[in-house]
Every structure is written in structure tokens, then in C-alpha cells.
Amino acid sequence: ELKVEQNPLFLSMQEGKNYTIYCNYSTTSDRLYWYRQDPGKSLESLFVLLSNGAVKQEGRLMASLDTKARLSTLHITAAVHDLSATYFCAVVNFGNEKLTFGTGTRLTIIP
Amino acid sequence: EPEVTQTPSHQVTQMGQEVILRCVPISNHLYFYWYRQILGQKVEFLVSFYNNEISEKSEIFDDQFSVERPDGSNFTLKIRSTKLEDSAMYFCASSEHRRWGGQPQHFGDGTRLSIL
């Protein structure tokens, strides 16, 4: 059974600082996604990572994938308050389409 | 930008009653999904649907659950006899391609189901 773990679960950081969220998964996968969720809202797709070594960047967020280590990272550069949200990684197994989500990281940016 | 729409946004139902949650996926998408999120917990897969049949379902999706695409636009989730533990946010999602290009699943705003 595919298991997806994120850490940290909670992250409180000051504006302007850098930090990284980690996503580990237990079995081989060919796709990994990062989603953002604001309180009481839907899930917004941020990144799709398809291959080993893939790196995607959008604004202050950068995601990478190491399929050999079964690890993805979401790096936040010079955080701003607008980035406060819960971030989920989600992994798809070979041969099926369901997303298995991580536990989520609740990020709070403090002015 | 096209989006997945869900109705109602909030549904309050007595335990034991049937409930139908409705979704309109993005029009050119072929794959449809239901997920749920119990308050404060992670998102859990319920079922995927393609070509008018269930392609995969989780252990949560027992005989009390069913899905249907009654026409060319709607995709519904029915819970036959609701239990207290069915209280959650239910998300509908759709995607364009199964595997090629790694297209993300696009999620609706969810229906908050409260069972009394």
C-alpha cells in the first residue's frame, strides 16, 4: 500500500525567510503533484512532477522530485503572507489513477 | 478558465437519509473522481470513473455509495443511508488524460456534508 508522508505538519515562519517542505512516499511512482488548499477552500494544483530530477518553479515556490529517494521537496523562497495555506503532495501509483495524498503541511507566514 | 462546479456547497442531512452530491466536471475531461476530507485530516480517494463505469474504488466506497453520470454533464455521488462518520468535505475532480502529459486533477470547491 502506498504511503505518503509530509513533514513538517505545521510550519510557522517569518516573512522573508526560506524553508523546505518534504514529501516521502513508500513505493515507486511515476507522478507527483503539489496542491495548495486555503481554509475551507478547494485544492489548487501547483506543480506536476513527472520524472527523476524534475524541477518546477512558480514565483517563490520551487518543487523537485528524486524518484530514487522517493522524495519531493517544496521550497519556499523569501516567504510572503499570501503563501499561508496548507500544502499537500499527492502521488499516483503505476497502473491506477487515484491520488494518494500526504498529511499536509499547514504553513503560516508571520509578518 | 474552466472549472469543476459542485452543488450544494453545504448539505445538512439526518442520519439514515439518502443524500446526492452533484458535480459538473470540466467539459472536455474524461476521468472523474470523488474524494473526501474529514475536518482537519488529509484528502482520501473514494472512486474514479471513466467511460461510464467505475475504474477504481477505495475501501471507504462500500455498498452505501454509488456514482452516476446521468447525462453528458453531471456526475453524482449518492450515499444511500448516511452515518455520522460520513460527515466530511466531499470533493469532485476531473482530468483530461489518464496518463499522458501528467495532467493534474482539477478539484471543485467541495460540498460540506453534515450528518445530524
Image: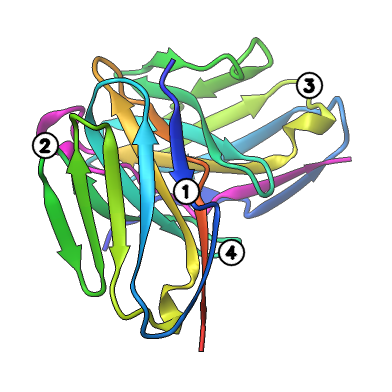
For discs 2 and 3, the disc positioned in front in the rendered view: 2
Residue identified by numbered label 1? A7
Q: Position of B30 compared to B88: left or right? A: left
Q: Which secondary structure, mark 2?
A: loop
For discs 2 and 4, the disc positioned in front in the rendered view: 2
Q: Which secondary structure, mark 4?
A: loop
Magenta stretch containing residue B110, yes or no?
A: yes
Q: Where is residue B30 shown, x and y percent of the image? A: 26, 31
Distance between mark 2 and mark 3 Cα atoms: 43 Å
N-terminal of the two: label 4 or label 1?
Answer: 1
Q: Residue at x 43, y 79 (%)?
A: A82
Residue identified by numbered label 3? B81
Distance between mark 1 and mark 2 Cα atoms: 22 Å
For discs 4 and 1, the disc positioned in front in the rendered view: 1
Amino acid identity at mark 1: Asn
Q: State which chain disc 2 sits on.
A: A
Residue identified by numbered label 2? A51
Depth check, front residue: B82 or A51: A51
Question: Magenta residues, as a range?
Answer: B96-116
N-terminal of the two: label 2 or label 4?
Answer: 4
